[in-house]
Image (tube, grey):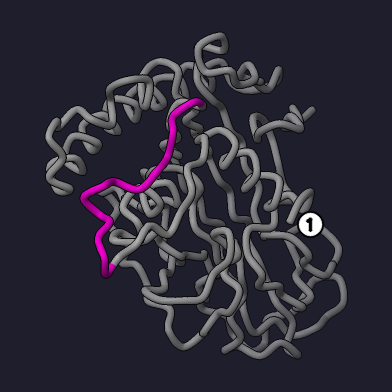
Amino acid sequence: ASVPMTNNYPYGYENHESLGIERSTATAVKKDQPSSILRHDSKETFSIGPIDREKSGMPSRKWQKDAPATFAPALTQYFNAMENLASVLFRGLALALQLDDSSWFLNEGRFDEGHQCALRILNYPHLEYEEEEGPKKVHIRAGAHTDYGAMTILKSGGPGLQLQLSSSKSNGVASTVDDTAWIDVPHLSDAFIINLGDLMQRWTNDKWRSTLHRVIAVADDCGTDQKNNNDNIPIVFQSVRRQSIAFFVNMNGNANIVPFDTCIDDEHPSQYDAVKASDYLIKRHAQSMGNAT
């Protein structure tokens, strides 16, 4: 049985998140499942948070009881490695921003053992689309969105990630999406992708932008004579299963996010009020689950 996510934040199994405004009206045929209209992102996830519940203030990790014996140790080891990598990246970001202290992000309760990071493994299932949809339609696996925290460390399992360099967005969610402006992110099998998040954009007063991105289904070879097993309907588009691992670098819950003085001047007045990191995190998560606006 799947372990459900909590109402407070996504730890456990989830399969009905809606990240962006895009919606597919296609009739999708997941293998061994009946056709249905896609109303949520076409993916399923399993997530864990910090091991120290007391310091982070986040829910305990929830593990599948029937998972392989190596499942929890493997995710825990990966989580720990990403914590260390995030600390290194924060030092690099501080140097790039010319902050007085290269450890600025790691000091004064901003990012330490009380952080609220989340590790999420994602499964994008095999998809097939019927002839009426047409082979050139864009099929969305994860809607256009920006990430909530300081940055995200992504290990991609295949092509399909796209980003947009400029767009109109509200509260981190794209309000208008120009389908001609998406750029394919090259897939490198032995590399990480680093996305800046909303908190870094707020810190830098829009000097650094949170990366608007989405995941689409990439077409695989599909012969015109291929049929849906149930209805004998021609299949003109199919995309194989895709998996990835995302480490969302979230700050300590009480970290105060306010634009740097060095990013504010007469030509660039402050664009953001101060916000507590955990308040912003929970608000954005609630929006993605359809619980708030």
Identify residue type, mark 1: Asp
Query: Residue at image x 57%, y 40%?
Result: 281
Query: Residue at image x 25%, y 54%?
Result: 263
- Judging by the rendered image, the residue that carries numbered circle 1 is 32
**Over which residues does the magenta segment extend?**
254-267
Task: Estimate the x, y position of residue 22 in percent, counting from the top left.
Answer: 66, 73
Q: Is residue 81 above or below residue 143?
A: above
Q: Is residue 132 left or right of residue 70?
A: right
Task: Estimate the x, y position of residue 54 in percent, counting from the top left.
Answer: 56, 9
Task: Estimate the x, y position of residue 86 in percent, counting from the top left.
Answer: 30, 33
Q: Is residue 160 left or right of residue 232?
A: left
Q: Decide which of 228, 109 is in the foreground and name it.
A: 109
The count of marks equals 1
| Residue 255 is one of the magenta-drawn residues | yes
Q: Decide which of 209, 13 is in the foreground and name it.
A: 209
Picture quarter with the N terminus: top right
Which secondary structure dominates the residues rendered in magenta? loop
Q: Is residue 189 above or below residue 115?
A: below
Query: Residue at image x 62%, y 48%?
Result: 284
Task: Estimate the x, y position of residue 171 in percent, counting from the top left.
Answer: 58, 59
Picture quarter with the C terminus: bottom right
Q: Secondary structure at mark 1?
A: loop
